[in-house]
Image (tube, helix red, strand yellow):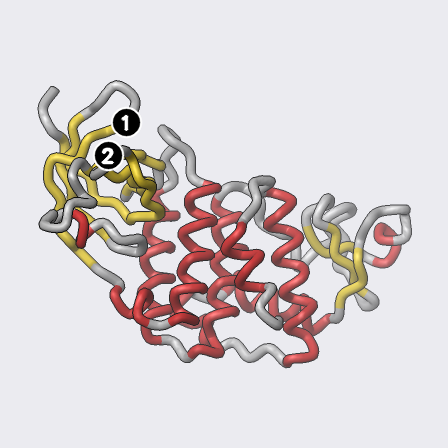
């Protein structure tokens, strides 16, 4: 079969045999693709230096029995700054881990690839303090693309406009009014400011997220909501997210 072109973001690499790598990729149409980079671990391999996580590549692939085989690869974007700084590496690792667990082979979601690249681009130069809001906004927006947009303006159960005191239910899919929250659900009370921060993240473009100011007293609540909501809809363990949010936050 002739080789075919593919632009993709490298999510993860795994050792195969003595010299090869298996790459988990997010294709430009949002599909997950797994491909073998033969000889990529050899000391003189030009390919090995190009297939680092966070890199964007233009490739030629051959269809194999179970995995694609990389015939050629050219770097489109390295995102070197994400690997050169610890805080940026940790934040970007959450993005690619979520993409790894949330993307599916053969299932296209073109907007996901575009948003991932914009997020990584912004993370390269954003202030360190803005990295966590970028991570949380990416989680919310990627879940929304998969059909799990949290209800933040209306009660997720009855559709009424909720008033304080507010609660959030991951099972119901968003904010609950006081009446619905009292109906024996597992909803947790949240501050109005936390709901406002979540709405700002959902409504802003990724390039605008660093401008969102979240009071430290509210940040812990926002963090809990996004982590719980993500875990409910992505049952696979997100080790990068657990580690990132567990570092003294």
Q: CA distance from mark 1 to mark 2?
A: 7 Å
Residue, x 60% and y 42% (percent of image)? 233
Residue, x 61% and y 70% (percent of image)? 197
Residue 244: percent from left, percent from top: 53, 63
Residue 167: percent from left, percent from top: 78, 59
Is 3 situated above or below 21?
above
Badge 1 vs badge 2, beta-carbon distance below 8 Å:
yes
Q: Which mark is residue 152?
A: none
Q: Which mark sits nearer the N-terminus, 1 or 2? A: 2
Q: Dot 2 surroundings within 10 Å: few (below 14), some, or many (20 or more)?
A: many
Q: Which mark is residue 67?
A: 1
Frontmost residue, 4 versus 42:
42
Is 122 situated above or below 16?
below
Quarter of the image where one finds residue 213:
bottom right
Residue 135: percent from left, percent from top: 49, 63
Residue 26: percent from left, percent from top: 33, 43
Residue, x 56% and y 40% (percent of image)? 236
Is 127 situated above or below 240?
below
- Residue 164 lies left or right of residue 209; in this view the side is right
Residue, x 47% and y 75% (percent of image)? 130
Q: Which residue is mark 2?
A: 36
- Residue 3 lies left or right of residue 12; in this view the side is left
Q: Specify the quadrant that holds the C terminus.
A: bottom right
Q: Dot 1 surroundings within 10 Å: few (below 14), some, or many (20 or more)?
A: some
Frontmost residue, 22 versus 145:
22
Frontmost residue, 243 versus 32:
243
- Residue 41 lies left or right of residue 121; in this view the side is left
């Amino acid at each position: 079969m002739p080789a075919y072109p593919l632009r993709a973001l490298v999510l993860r690499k795994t050792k195969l045999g003595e010299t090869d790598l298996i790459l988990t990729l997010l294709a430009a149409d949002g599909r997950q693709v797994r491909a073998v980079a033969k000889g990529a671990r050899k000391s003189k391999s030009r390919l090995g230096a190009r297939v680092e996580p966070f890199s964007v590549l233009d490739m030629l692939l051959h269809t194999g029995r179970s995995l694609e085989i990389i015939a050629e690869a050219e770097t489109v974007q390295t995102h070197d700054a994400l690997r050169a700084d610890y805080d940026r590496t940790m934040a970007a690792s959450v993005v690619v881990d979520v993409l790894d667990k949330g993307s599916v082979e053969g299932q296209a979601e073109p907007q996901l690839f575009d948003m991932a690249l914009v997020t990584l681009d912004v993370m390269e130069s954003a202030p360190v303090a803005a990295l966590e809001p970028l991570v949380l906004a990416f989680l919310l927006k990627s879940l929304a693309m998969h059909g799990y947009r949290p209800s933040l303006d209306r009660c997720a159960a009855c559709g009424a406009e909720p008033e304080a005191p507010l609660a959030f239910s991951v099972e119901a899919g968003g904010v609950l009014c006081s009446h619905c929250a009292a109906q024996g659900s597992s909803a947790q009370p949240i501050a109005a400011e936390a709901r406002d921060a979540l709405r700002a993240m959902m409504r802003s473009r990724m390039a605008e997220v660093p401008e969102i100011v979240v009071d430290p007293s509210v940040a812990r609540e926002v963090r809990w909501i996004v982590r719980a909501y993500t875990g409910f809809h992505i049952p696979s363990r997100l080790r990068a997210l657990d580690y990132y949010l567990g570092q003294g936050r």
